[in-house]
Amino acid sequence: MSKDEIYKRPLQNIEDFSFDKAVSDAFDDMVDRSVPGYRTLIANIGPIASHFLRPNTHCYDLGCSHGAASLSIFNCLPHDSITIHAVDNSSAMIEQCNQLVLQAGANACIKTQLADINNLDIQNASVVVLNLTLQFLPLEQRHTLLKNIVKGMNPGGACILTEKIILEDNSTEQLFQALHTNFKSANQYSQLEISQKRKAIENVLIRESLEDHRKRLIDVGFSDVTVWFQCLNFVSLIAVK
Ligand code: GEK
């Protein structure tokens, strides 16, 4: 695992953040040092998924990066007749994911796929994971994707949705932003790295409020939406069909 030094030196032009080879190489370090509670999220996604998985159904990990959520689920599989589809549209991410899946001896169960999650044919799903992925889709694509997920999901199935949200109350939003900056500083990111990364990501990671997420999940056809995790602006929901 490489250390994340992508924004360490002053950059003349800060380009929009993208999931290229440099980001994939540093991803595990980057996500651990940038997302409060990332390891807790991953550790719990397996057991949560296991509760909803049914024999002979599919599980989808959309925007899987290196497959951490898929591997967490694989380690908690309640039935061996489940196929986990780990999908990402970054070839660097999928290549690394493939290697890790092979190393874990999970390649009979986890099928990696290089694809845009907007173009998937989701079928017979009992669990769909969107762990920190929906936030990277343009706003206008989010409703259609979730509608497609509900359409391909069996009744009683669940979507695990983790997002960086925006707080509706401005003073709490300011407080959480400041605490998140403290978190990154405590993880050895310099002020320069924090500000350059913020600039790179501002047009790419579009946050919405918890209320907007909840409303859209209900609009597309989920019947029950519960928050199971929150640390600062990072929230994870279980939406049941
Ligand atoms: C984890 N879930 O470790 N189609 C496919 N993949 C996409 C798309 C798209 N349209 N847009 C973005 N991605 C992971 C972490 S990272 C979150 C998810 C982060 C992919 C993108 O290539 C990247 O791998 C992932 O979504 C977002 O549990 O880096 O903060």
Image (cartoon, rainbow, N blue to C red):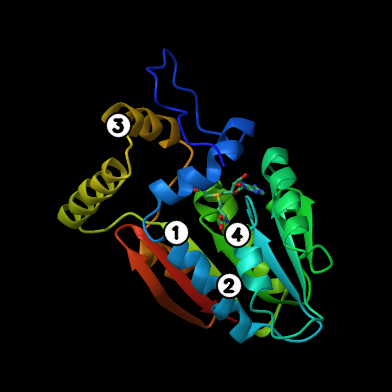
What is the C-alpha distance between the residues marked 2 and 4? 17 Å
**Residue 131: x percent and y percent?**
54, 60
- The mark that comes first in sequence, 4 or 1, is 1
Is residue 228 shown above or below 233? below
Residue beneath label 2, please? 159
- The mark that comes first in sequence, 3 or 2, is 2
Q: Viewer-proximal residue, 212 or 132?
A: 132
Crowd class of label 3 (few under 14; some 14 to 19; many from 20; radius 10 Å): some
- The mark that comes first in sequence, 4 or 3, is 4
Q: Is residue 148 visible?
A: no
Residue beneath label 4, please? 68
Could you tell whether 206 is left or right of 194 in the image?
Answer: right
Q: Do the residues labelled 4 and 1 touch (CB within 8 Å)?
A: no
1 vs 2, front mark: 1
SS class of the residue under badge 2? strand
What is the C-alpha distance between the residues marked 1 and 3? 20 Å
Residue beneath label 3, please? 190
Look at the numbered disc 1 and say if its residue's Cβ is closer than 8 Å to ligand 1: yes
Q: Disc 3 residue type?
A: Ser
Could you tell whether 170 is left or right of 119 in the image?
Answer: left
Look at the numbered disc 3 and say if its residue's Cβ is closer than 8 Å to ligand 1: no
Residue beneath label 1, please? 38
- The mark that comes first in sequence, 1 or 2, is 1
Q: Disc 1 residue type?
A: Tyr
What is the C-alpha distance between the residues marked 1 and 2? 18 Å
